[in-house]
Amino acid sequence: MRNGYRVYKRVVFITTIITIFVALLSNKGYGYEFIYFIPIVYLVLFMICKRVHFYSSKYSGLLILNGLMFLKYVIAILATCATQSYTLPSYYAVSVSQSSYHWATFIVMGEEIATFLTIELCADAIYKSKKNQIHVDKKYDRVKMGPVMFLFIIISLICVALMPQYLFGTIGILFSSENQMTQTLETNHVMSMVFGAFKIVFIGLFINKAIVKYQESHKIRYMIFSYLLIAVHCFLNISTSRMNIIIPFFLFVLITPKIYGKAGLWFNTIIGISLSVIIGIVSVYKMPWIFVGNSSPFVAFFSDFSKRLQEYTSNIMPTAMGLQAIEAYKSSIDITTFFKDIFGVMPVISHYINENEMIYTIYNQYALAGINNTQLIPMTISSIAYFTPVCTYLLVIVCTLLLMKLEDKNNYEAKNYINDYLKLYLFFVFASCTFSNVQMLAGRLFTNYIPAMAILYLNQYVGRDTRIVIGKNKVWQK
C-alpha cells in the first residue's frame, strides 16, 4: 500500500496547489470571500502531520478518512470555484446571510484542523501495539455456513419471493417520484434491515467462493464472476442516494488489489466508469431543469453538481444554512434530540419517536419549507445544536477516535470476503463523519452493519459442530 500511497500524496499535493490558485484567482461569490483558506489550511496540515500519512499507508480505515477529507476540503472547493457555483440551488426556501457563510467557512476550517490533530496526537497511543506489525497478503478461507446463516438465507429468499419490491424497490426510482420512494424506504425499516443484511451476506458468500476459487486456480473466469456479483450488488442499491451505489464498489476496490493485482485494476476502472455513467443518469434524472432555459445543459449540469457536491460533503453552504436553522429552531433542539436522532432510525423503536422532533426534519423544515426531507444537516452543526458551540467538533472527534479504536481492535476469526467487507463498511461509516450526521451514521449501522454482523457472529458461535461447507460440495458435516 505504501507505494500507492506515495502516488496518492503527490496527486493530493498537486491538486491542492491548483485548488488554492483557482480559489484565489476566481471571482468569488457572495459569502465565499474566504473560501481559499480551506485548501490552504488543508495543505499545511497535510504537509506537517506525519503520523496521518504513516498510519494511512498501513490502515484502510484512516486511508478512507484521508481520502474523504481530500474530497471535502479540496475537490469540492475546486469544483465550486472552477464553476463559480456560489448561488443557492433554487429549491431552497430561504436565503443565507453573508455572516453565516463566513462563520461556516471558519467552522469547516476548524473541522479539518480538529480531524488532522486528533489523528496526529492520538494515533500512536491507539495503534502502538501494531505500529511495527508487518501486514501480509491475506488468503481467504471458504465460508462455513452454520444453521443460523442457512435459516436467515432461507427466510430472506422467501421474503424476496413474497415481497420483491423491498429488494428491488430502490431501482423503481427510475420510474417513481422521489417522494414516493422516500416514503417506501422510511416506512419499512424492518424489511430494509433484512434485505440490507441479505444483500451483504448472500452475495458475499458467492463473491468469497469466487475469490477462493481464483486463489486456488488463478483462472480469469472466477475473477470476472466476482466482478459481475459486485455489479449486481451495486445495481440492487440504486436509489436516490448515490452513495448507496458507490459504497459497495468502493469497498470491493479496497479489498481486491492484493487478490487480483494489475488485472483487478483494469476491472476496477471499467466498473468505475460504468458506475459513473449510472450515477450520471440518476443525477440527470434528479435535475431535469438543466434542459430548460439553458443554452448549455452540460455546463448547467456541472454547475449544479458542484452545488450538490457541497451538500454531499457538508461544506460551506449547508453549514451556513444549518447555522441559521438551529438559530431559528433553537427552542426545539436539545440533548434529547441527539437520542431521538439515534433511535429514530432503529427498527421498531423508530415507530415510537416523533419524526418531526428529529434534527433532519427541523433542518429541512427550515431549508426546504418541509417539502421533503432530502437534505442532511452537517455533523458540526448537529454538535452545536445538541451540546452548544463549545462542542462544535465533539462528534467529529469522537467518530475519528472510534474509527481508529475499532480498526485497532476489530479482528474476526475467519478470513473471508464478508468479514473484510463488514470491517471496511464499519470503518467507512465512522470515516464519513465529516460528510454525514448522527442519523445517517446510525441508520447505516442499524440497516446494514449490525444485522449482517449479528448473522455472522451467530453463525460462528451457534451450532459450531455442524456446518454447511461452501466449496466444491455443499454437505452437512460433524
Image: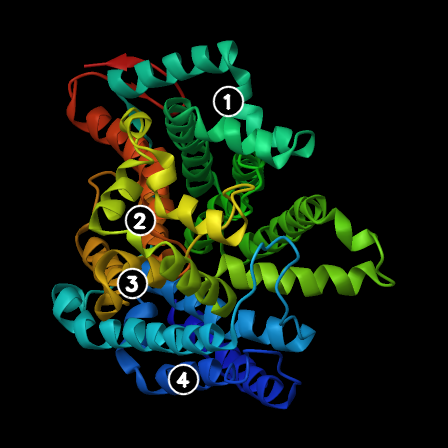
Image quarter (top left, top right, bottom left or bottom right) of the C terminus: top left
Residue marked by disc 2: 332
Residue marked by disc 1: 166
Q: Give the mark nearest the N terminus, 4 or 1.
A: 4
The quarter of the picture where residue 393 lies is bottom left
Q: Give the mark nearest the N terminus, 3 or 4.
A: 4
Question: 10 Å neighbourhood of mark 2: few (<14), some, or many (≥20)?
Answer: some
Q: Position of residue 124 (x, y in %)?
A: 16, 73
- Contact between marks 2 and 3 (CB within 8 A): the answer is no
Q: Position of residue 73 (x, y in %)?
A: 47, 73
Cα–Cα gap, marks 2 and 3: 13 Å
The quarter of the picture where residue 89 lies is bottom right
Q: Where 313 sits versus 366, above or below?
A: below
Outermost residue, right direction? 295
Cα–Cα gap, marks 2 and 4: 35 Å
Cα–Cα gap, marks 2 and 1: 34 Å
Amino acid, disc 3: Ile
Compared across the picture, whether 388 is left or right of 217 comes to left
Amino acid, disc 4: Val
Q: Give the mark nearest the N terminus, 1 or 3.
A: 1
Amino acid, disc 2: Ser
Which residue is painted at 32% across and 56% down in the image?
330
Q: Give the mark nearest the N terminus, 2 or 1.
A: 1
Q: Nearer the viewer, mark 1 or mark 3?
A: 3
Q: Which mark is residue 384?
A: 3
Q: Where 428 sits versus 110, above or below?
A: above
Amino acid, disc 1: Tyr
Residue marked by disc 4: 41
Element assignment for label 4: helix
Number of numbered discs on residues: 4
Q: Is residue 418 in view?
A: no
